[in-house]
Amino acid sequence: MEARLEKVPGRQEEFIIKDSTGITVGRIFSVEINIENHFYILRIKLYKENDYEILRSVLYRLMKGIFAAGGIYKVNIFVDQTIDTRSFIDLGFELEGVIEDTIWNNGHCRFELLFGITANRFNSNQIKNRVVLKGKNINLKLLLPSDADKTLDYYTRNKEHLRPYEPERDDSFYTMDVQKKILIESYKQYLNGSSINYGIFNVKDELIGKIQLSNIVTGIFKNAFVGYSMDIRYEGRGYMKETLKLVVNYAFENMKLHRIEASTLVDNNRSQNVLMSCGFKEIGISKKYLFIDGMWRDHKIFYCTKEFYKNL
Ligand SMILES: CC(C)(COP(=O)(O)OP(=O)(O)OC[C@H]1O[C@@H](n2cnc3c(N)ncnc32)[C@H](O)[C@@H]1OP(=O)(O)O)[C@@H](O)C(=O)NCCC(=O)NCCS
């Protein structure tokens, strides 16, 4: 949906956002224009939450206008945590910060997100698209803060299924706020190259599992850790084996890693089968390795190198 921007009469620092029917759907406030340092800081408030099309259209027109006028190289925008972050990501913005507890709403404190973009990035249209790895039965997509509803649903319906395998979680974990915070953190880690948090989506585009490459180290180590889980309704169909093969292939061929490590509970034969089918070999037992389901538990450690994978 196209959006229109109108100046508020007599107020240089404020614009009204209207939708195509003329209804006011939000406001833009100018926070600081620093001509000497070529930056411009804005705050956007939308009355209608999660309207991807409107926000994307507003952002596109705003950035086009600001950068075309010259004089400004960098734009930062504050937005409420509830907005659909895809509108920013699709246009090439990067998440630069999370400002805790800045908005009071019905007695609850919410946070604001700070997005940033440079003129070069906008004009050269080097959009950092969602990383998608395509398989035969599943696709892997980078999880973004706007996927919080999907991860909340995934963890809620698999609470009992995952309890024996994953760290202890209190009730707050099963809320939109915490899921969004987790995804913001993992998106920041993706941007600084230390982790990739993929959602596993089936042909109907439902989130049916998760896989994460974490502690990614380059240089002479070229190593990462992998962890994963599958929705109870979709286990045993070969989806995790397909997923892990895609991720391992991407890690070795595109990210140029040399080694990937994984750990499973000693009696998690299912997960061990997945690893071994994808070229992983057992190293041994690491004692009292992770705090799972109320105890420090021994884990079997596996590793896969580029050479093992090539010889599969
Ligand atoms: C482990 C897990 C990710 C596997 O996902 P999945 O999609 O069911 O895995 P796949 O169907 O691709 O493969 C499962 C493999 O285990 C085998 N398997 C199935 N049930 C098994 C069992 N009870 N014991 C041993 N192997 C079993 C399957 O036969 C298959 O191997 P194969 O094709 O060589 O025969 C999933 O069961 C899960 O999420 N479990 C709970 C969380 C978890 O364990 N996470 C991993 C922590 S290390």
Image (cartoon, rainbow, N blue to C red):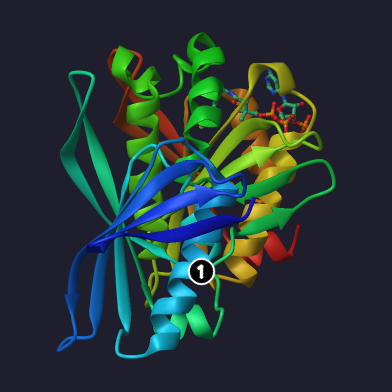
Give the quarter of the figure containing the C terminus.
bottom right
Residue nearer the viewer, 196 or 72: 72
Residue 278 visible, this angle? no
User: Looking at the rendering, which quadrant does residue 8 occupy?
Assistant: bottom left
Estimate the x, y position of residue 275 in percent, counting from the top left. Answer: 62, 41
Question: Which residue position is annotated with label 1?
Answer: 61
Residue depicted at 74% across the width and 63% down the height: 311
Give the residue at x 45% y 86%: 68
Q: Secondary structure at mark 1?
A: helix
Q: Amino acid at mark 1?
A: Arg
- Residue at the top extreme of this rendering: 160
Q: Residues within 10 Å of mark 1 (few under 14, many from 20)?
A: few
Residue 262 pos. (x, y %): 48, 44
Give the left or right position of residue 200, taking residue 217 as reference. right
| Residue 182: quadrant of the picture | top left
Apparent side of residue 224 relative to residue 9 in the rendered image (left or right): right
x, y percent for residue 65: 45, 77
Q: Residue furthest front?
A: 9
